[in-house]
Amino acid sequence: MSRKKIVAGNWKMNKDYLAGMELISEAVYMIKDELHKEVTTVFATPYIHLSSVSKLIQAETNFHVAAQNCHQEKSGAYTGEISAEMIASLGVQYVILGHSERREYQKEDSALLAKKVNIALENKLTPIFCIGEKLEERESNVHFKTVQNQIEESLFHLSADQMKSIVLAYEPVWAIGTGKTASPEQAQEMHAFIRGIIAAQYSNEIAESISILYGGSCNPGNAKVLFSQKDIDGGLIGGASLKSRDFTDIHIAYNTL
């Protein structure tokens, strides 16, 4: 079964409106011009860009836009928050949920994230659901259990059909923004483990249909060797997504595979 290849750029809290639109325009032009294989590109921009980016790429088959988060409730007195329904109304297709920074800084736990997954799916948004271990968890040899718990507690209440709508992103927390990267062997080992968990809970067919992205300091220098691994289906790109040349070169890694 051919899984969707995805390169998603998570801008985090970077780029004002004009700088962001300039970056999008450059990246779309360069990727269209230089990429010769079918890869799904997702721009996870700050909220201020979502509407304009959605309009800019609406005619582009392989380009999509993602919010970086959504609230777990449909609506209400939640000052400063944004709902899944609001996001979907802009023509947005994806939403990042469970990113390690939100787990850490906003103390988002598995129960809360399960609610966010539910509301996203109700509004036809595809969750890019992040999972991953901290350095101390890997060094204590509990990294597999950590990731398994994150998946089971936030996703395994879903039906088989719902599960097929999830994109997973494995992000070793110790490799985010540090310049460190899991070795291709370490990344592949965890991706295969994740796919095995899903197969055991649902089926091999569903496990083989789900895209699992790598999200730990992926860059133009290591993208090819990471993407060549059997169970790695693309990347959730942080810092390198803020430069159109770097982001394009990460896509190009697929051209020679």
Image: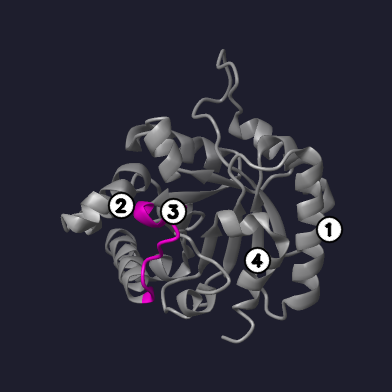
CA–CA distance in space, label 2 to label 4: 26 Å
Closer to us: mark 1 or mark 3? 3
Mark identifier at residue 246:
4
Q: Amino acid at mark 2?
A: Glu
Name the residue that disc number 3 marks. 176
Where 47 sits versus 235, above or below?
Answer: above
Closer to us: mark 1 or mark 2? 2
Query: What residue is shown at x 50% (from left), y 65% (from top)?
Result: 218
Q: Is residue 182 magenta?
A: yes
- Name the colouring of the figure: one colour
Q: Going by the image, does 163 lie left or right of 252?
A: left
CA–CA distance in space, label 3 to label 2: 11 Å
Q: How many marks?
A: 4
Name the residue that disc number 2 marks. 133
Q: Position of residue 252 (x, y in %)?
A: 65, 76
Q: Is residue 109 magenta?
A: no
Closer to us: mark 1 or mark 4? 4
Give the residues in magenta. Answer: 172-184
User: Mark 2 or mark 4: which comes first in sequence?
Assistant: 2
Q: Quadrant of the C terminus?
A: bottom right
Disc 2 + disc 4, Cβ < 8 Å: no
**Is any part of residue 90 visible from this angle?**
no
Q: Nearer the viewer, residue 108 or 156?
A: 108
* Residue 76, image quadrant: top right
Where 14 sits versus 213, above or below?
Answer: above
Q: Position of residue 67 (x, y in %)?
A: 62, 42
Where 164 sits versus 104, above or below?
Answer: below
CA–CA distance in space, label 4 to label 3: 17 Å
User: Mark 1 or mark 3: which comes first in sequence?
Assistant: 1
Residue lying furthest left in this view?
A: 140
Say what secondary structure mark 1 lies in. Answer: loop
User: Mark 1 or mark 2: which comes first in sequence?
Assistant: 1
